[in-house]
Amino acid sequence: MITAVRKPLNEIIEMVAPCEKILVTGCGTCVTIDYSGGAKEAAILASQLRIARRLGGKKLETLEQTVERQCEWEFVKEFTDHAAECQAIISMACGAGIQTVAAAFPDKPVFPGVNTRFIGMPQKQGVWEERCICCGNCVLHLTGGLCPFARCAKTLLNGPCEGSQDGKCEVNRELDCVWQQIYDSLKERGRLADLQKIFPLRDWSTGEDGGYRITVREDMML
Amino acid sequence: MNANSGLKKLLAKEEFVVIAGIGIPRGADFKPLEERYKLLEKKVNAFYIPDNPGANVHLLGLAAAVHLEKLGGETVLELNCRDRNRIAIQSSILGAAALGIPNLLFSTGDHQTLGNFRGAKRVYDVDLTQAIQVARGMRDEKKFSNGEEVAQPPSIFIGAEANPFADPFEFRAALMAKKVEAGADFVQIRAVFDLERFGKWIKLVRQQEPLQKIPILAGIIPLVSVEQAKSLQEAPGMIVPDSIIQRLEASGKPEDEGIKIAKEIIAQVKKTEGVRGIVLHASGMESLVPDLIK
């Protein structure tokens, strides 16, 4: 899933300062599951903003609406009626959702309500960990099912750096060294010999280094 | 210009080599470098020029290396993968070789969040093994990493950083073999304090076919205080045994005890098969070096 965290309240208060009526929108998919930007979090943010405004002696009106996915035109169109009544929209979706809303309502200011973090998974209740950087050229079959780009701070492909110790990363001793994990995983699978291969230079242009990416599938086009 | 590695010649002659890691200034002035150089002039075989160590800004290593070469000192210039992509690495190799820098040491580089510029963007386009492979390809096959021809191949002696004190321990010798297969002519290892671990690592190294003839240069850091030893104990990739800290604490003169410890470690690594020299990391402690290598 794509994970996010709510933006600090003061930042959002500042964004909506010129507005008297705003639409706070939630997204029903990833950010609902990670408790950062679903219907419940949209309602909480709306009430926090109203309270903050009232404490300043003024009034803020809010509407709230959550759709299935803010990253699709057909869903964000559902905001049309509420948006017409408001001066601005707060989107609590991930960056993809926020940009879809901004593009769908070009006459309104659209503010981000969350900071999008990463593609990851809930490791346990309340803890999410990054797993994928969308590099566009997966190597998980070579690395024991652990991604050295998402999980190694130096995106190394030929083994650990010189700072890995006791299974921990040199960047932060709270982080596991993924190369220790890759080694253990390949050892358990009887595939340590795979690590002796020298992986050549990588083509990073399939990832974010090649400009923003567009996938075109002729077979899916109408 | 074709660089001419004195280090390569010394290693070929089976001589024990002494390299001094020299402190690189953090200002636009060579004077501090010259002062440190004078303390070590003609006392060591070469100078190791670290590349923005600790992920902190220092004067450009290439500039420092060129200056030392002009003064008459041979240099080993570090090029890390943290600060340069494949374009900059290859361009640095050409520039260094053209300026007469004979020895290049490739490293991964301390992560940028460990220094004082935590918000810096990472590079790591090329990893250490790949950087060595690229350098070897430029020198021996006259090819850039994309296959294009190098007009004048760089004459360089290629070094790789390695660390016996990092984990996974069982993989460290095999990882070093990868670096050597990629093209490393010599290997420079991190500072040795834990001789037991070092001995275990050497045994694994001896079992690796590609490593039988590779010259290993062992890192040595003279300890001058208990605080310094404790701070090194906490540094990533270092092992400083408690017994060493206890010796410094028990001594009335930690600086003298530190020198004694360093001399013991040098004596031990010197008689280890495969170890062909030392790299004394004496940044700020250059005055201690002559006594250490007596």
Image (cartoon, rainbow, N blue to C red):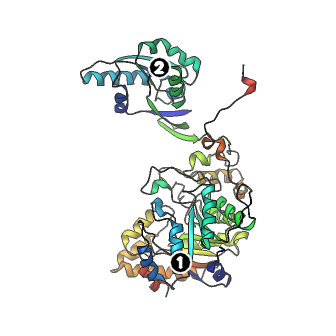
Answer yes or no: is residue B271 visible.
yes
Q: Mark 1 points at which residue?
A: B70
Question: Eyeballing the image, is A78 above or below A219?
Answer: above
Q: Where is residue A108 in the image (x, y as percent from the top left)?
A: 45, 20
Badge 2 marks a residue whose secondary structure is loop
Residue at 63 percent of width and 35 percent of height:
A213
- Badge 1: chain ID: B
Badge 1 marks a residue whose secondary structure is helix
Task: In this rendered view, identify the residue nearer to me: B95 or B230.
Answer: B95
Image-based side of B240 in relation to B162, left or right: left
Answer yes or no: is residue B279 visible.
no
Q: Where is residue A65 in the image (x, y as percent from the top left)?
A: 46, 17
Question: Eyeballing the image, is B196 above or below B38?
Answer: above
Question: Eyeballing the image, is A79 above or below B206?
Answer: above
Residue type pointed to by label 2: Asp
Q: Mark 2 points at which residue?
A: A107
Residue at 68 percent of width and 82 percent of height:
B12
Q: How crowded is mark 1: few (under 14 residues within 10 Å), some or many (20 or more)?
A: few
Residue at 52 percent of width and 65 percent of height:
B51
Instruction: Kindly check if marks 2 and 1 are in contact, taking CB atoms under 8 A apart as contact.
Output: no
Q: Which mark is residue B111?
A: none
Corner quadrant of residue A2 = top right
Image-based side of B247 in relation to A55, left or right: right
Q: Where is residue B272 in the image (x, y as percent from the top left)?
A: 61, 79
Task: In this rendered view, identify the residue nearer to me: B178 or B267.
Answer: B178
Corner quadrant of residue A7 = top left
Q: Which residue lies furthest to the left in this view?
A: A57
